[in-house]
Amino acid sequence: MRETKMTRTLTSIPSEKPAASVAATDGKRRAVISGVAPEIEAGRFPIKRTAGERVVVEADAFADGHDKLACVLKHRRSGDSEWIEMPMQDLGNDRWRGEFTVEEPGRYAYTVAAWTDAFLSWRNDLERRTDEDDIALALLAGADLVAAAAARADGKPASRLRAIAETLKGAGPTAERRATALAEELRALMARYADRQFAALYPRELEVVVDIARARYSSWYEMFPRSCSVAGRHGSFRDCEARLAYIAELGFDVLYLPPIHPVGRVKRKGKNNALSAGPREHGSPWAIGAKEGGHKSVHPELGSIEDFRSLVARARERGIEIALDIAFQCAPDHPYVGEHPEWFRHRPDGSVQYAENPPKKYEDIYPFNFETEDWPALWDELKSIFEFWHGEGVRIFRVDNPHTKPFAMWEWIIADLKRKDPGVIFLAEAFTRPKVMYRLAKLGFTQSYTYFSWRNTKRELTEYFTELTQTEVREFFRPNLWPNTPDILTEYLQFGGRPAFMTRFALAATLGASYGIYGPAFELCENRPREPGSEEYLDSEKYEIRQWDLARPDSLKDFIVRVNRIRRENPALHHDWNLRFHSVDNDELICYGKATRDLDNIIVVVVNLDCYHVQSGWVELPLQDLGLDPEHPYQMHDLLSDARYLWHGARNFVQLDPGRSPAHIFRLRRRVHNERDFDYFL
């Protein structure tokens, strides 16, 4: 039963048919459908959308000869028996486009059908006929087509089609009968009751996974609960509740907590990843499990499960969702180690194999052996961890190093959980090779960490974000941009000072609809590496409790508040696909924009990538694409400083001093002339 449930059923390849059989069944199906997009790996994986978004589908559809083709996009909610059809528009060169909107979270299917349409072909010829006798004969042929459609219809449409057929073959004036034949009413009725007995259907039903809006647009704040206290005390969930007001003021809507479980004592790491811990050192939260419990337990010093439920509820009242870190690994004293030794690898001396990346040893971590003979039970237990915390009100999970666990397991777990709750979100923390990252996204992860942290130059940023937002990658990969994490303190942040943190924050919050920071380290510009050349923090919170002075005057709090408010108030920044880069004649300046489809909200961002020097240059905007008249000025309202500039034409000058503000976030406002004979900007 287990293996049947987890195994994909492969469609068998049909055997060759005799020519006579092909002619009898398929010979009259003249339409050909190919090149359907979006389609991920021949339909093996679904595309992604969020509720309320469009699915725009294109396909190549054509037939032999000169007959006109009809093409429709078919879609339905998974589980529904009836298809909904939308006509596809002929784009020219045998390319067709249609679209539908997915209203609710869940799964949807779509495909394409096409057929040679005798009525459309007849109508096209009739429009071009000029000879009176030809028109009269053509009307008689058209009457037969309309009568056949009446036989396929019922009720009032059938009666109307029969009446039109009689008109076409009647004795009335030819011009009037021709006008009836070419009228929109008849075209619509004939499309509704078209002869589809020889329609071609694309052989694959493609899928769309539809998530809640937060899957597309979100702002994450990562915080260690044990560091939320004062005076060196171990923090608690109640301390986290007290911190919620600060996080809400900053403007974040997801509070991500590293593992909250009991921390192992055996081989516990000390301060700065020391191989041994002192008696009052707390170890790494990722060394999960001790005598108090494992992945379904909370650290006793954080509080009780009731305290955690209270935190979830209080956060939700402020519009904040709690995200939990799920790390599938164990400390040596995790209950799993004693209860299920078969789930772990063993060394020749019989001891359990700890994690290592020679010469580095992680003796406080035991990885699971996913090649164990007992893998079905292991999979079940790991899925139950998500189910447990979902039952406690958690709907967002950040998954630690998913690329080191089986792809098939993730596909099974995520699909099963999303069937029960389509609103669950999974963030893949997989800083690994691109194809592996993309595979995880395809098989179900809702969002993904990216290489943004290490893309610093204009060329690097432009090339990378063009790939993420303007290629097929965008159909399945939703980026979540992090300037820093507890594991990542980049060289740019180490040496760029406060301007570097502001620059990276402005980029993350405007290039991506979803982003996150590890705080309070970020807003307090923590930039001390453990050693030269390392991206590890000195005195890292991964190994000790830190006390943070949130009221420090050099905090970036006010800057973060402003940027997050700009994000909330400007819907153009709620999406990724609308990102477009604009020309600026200085490689230290990067310029890009986002706009809503109706161009009612247009944001243009200019960022100085040089943390040390004033940089200036000429920005060039595509006026036609932005709906601007090149003969009229327009206003650029800097939402960061509230300054307003009057720009003229496509090319305009900008200058940014990183010591003051490394970025402009402009709201473009058009000049409007009203009937009272004065101008203003919208």
Image (cartoon, grey):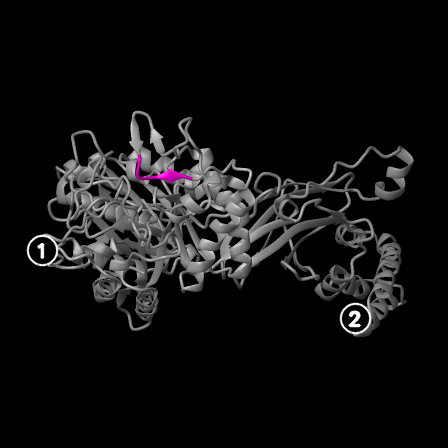
Q: Which residues are magenta?
A: 363-367
Main secondary-structure element of the magenta-colored stretch: loop
Q: Position of residue 12 (x, y in %)?
A: 74, 38
Look at the numbered disc 1 and give the secondary structure of its residue: loop
According to the picture, the residue beneath numbered tag 2 turns out to be: 157
Count of numbered marks: 2
Q: Amino acid at mark 1?
A: Arg
Q: Nearer the viewer, residue 36 or 4?
A: 4
Q: Is residue 364 magenta?
A: yes
- Quarter of the picture containing the C terminus is bottom left
In the figure, residue 394 lies in which quadrant?
bottom left
When the figure is inspected, residue 660 is found, relative to residue 635, above or below; the finding is above
In the figure, residue 267 lies in which quadrant?
top left
Q: Is residue 585 visible?
A: yes
Q: Is residue 669 visible?
A: no
According to the picture, the residue beneath numbered tag 1 turns out to be: 552
| Precedes in sequence: disc 1 or disc 2 | 2
Label 2 Cα crowd, 10 Å radius (few <14 / some 14-19 / many 20+): some
Q: Position of residue 67 (x, y in %)?
A: 77, 45
Q: Amino acid at mark 2?
A: Pro
Residue at (20% x, 36% y) in the render: 274
Which numbered dot is residue 231? none
Q: Nearer the viewer, residue 638 or 302?
A: 302
Q: Nearer the viewer, residue 366 or 515?
A: 366
Q: Position of residue 421 (x, y in %)?
A: 51, 61
Relative to 179, 214 lies left or right: left
In the figure, residue 31 lies in which quadrant?
top right
Q: CA distance from mark 1 to mark 2?
A: 74 Å
